[in-house]
Amino acid sequence: MIARLRLVFVGVALLVTTLGLLVPQALAMALGWKLANRLPMVWQRVAARIVGIRVRLAGTPSREHPLLIVSNHVSWADITVLGSVLPLSFIAKAEVRRWPVFGWLAVLQRTVFVAREARGRTGEQADAIATRLSAGDVMVLFAEGTTSDGNEVLPFKTALFGAAQASLRMSAFETVLVQPVAIAYTHAHGFPLGRSGRPLAAWPGNVALGPHLVRFVEEGAVDAIVAFGEPIRFGPTSDRKIVAKQCEDAVRRLLAQALMGKLETRPRRGHLRDGGGRNKTV
């Protein structure tokens, strides 16, 4: 009974939050205001608190732009976890746009949708991402191309790493920063999840979304770590396959350290932009 009441509370609270930010975000997107970058972060922070996700950070997001964040992908909750840390947009598979509610929210997050199976459109899709990078937007690439069980990192797909190179052609920047990031779900109600408990947070492709989302929300009080690795400079002559492998190795190492409790973490705090257009944690 308590779990069901919590589910209703979360649903109503998220609905009220969404309706409150919907018109300002739609207006900001239509008019090209910078506010359109920040309002989704506000929504994600409120959502994380309502749902019961506590986010801790290890390492620091790069202050330099253009910035492409390359992350592992564990769950639908990754969107809220990462989106609550700093203003950013995601790169998602095209079918997400057609999902009820989630697709609508993804559009408001200014997501770039790509058809991963359409190999003939890889260049076009990379250019769309590059345009956003060149404009100063921080973009997130879930390089595994699917979700995992949260205990390991799947091989990274390399095609969309070409977006970093394409952004150099579209701008005066000499390099693009590619920063590996690991997302780890470590505790529930203060107790370690462990390998067998990770399915509470992990949402691999063979698990139905609805029941998983309900169970996660009913449980609440989940701890997540976002671990930032050392940024990699991607220049005109860089090899996307080599950079992808470097990111994969870094994310795998960070995930293992986070799951074993070997990272020094801190609470997530505010995130602002300084006068030079760079990101600054406060």
Image (tube, rainbow, N blue to C red):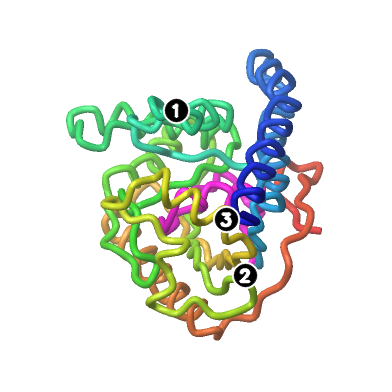
Separation of residues labelled 1 and 3 (CA atoms): 21 Å
Q: Earlier in the sequence, mark 3 or mark 2?
A: 2
Name the residue at 35% across, 64% down: 149
Q: Which residues are magenta?
A: 57-86
Q: Secondary structure at mark 2?
A: loop
Distance from the alpha carbon under mark 2 to that under mark 1:
35 Å
- Frontmost residue, 205 versus 160: 205
Image coords of residue 237 (percent x, y) = 33, 50
Amino acid type of disc 3?
A: Glu
Within 10 angstroms of label 1, few (less than 14), some, or many (20 or more) residues? few
Q: Earlier in the sequence, mark 1 or mark 3?
A: 1
- Look at label 1 and name its amino acid: Pro
Of residue 166 and residue 106, the one placed in the foreground of this image is 106
Residue 183 x %, y %: 50, 63
Residue lying farthest front? 1
Circle number at residue 100? 1
What residue is shown with label 3? 218
Q: Residue at image x 50%, y 68%?
A: 184
The C terminus, quarter of image: bottom right
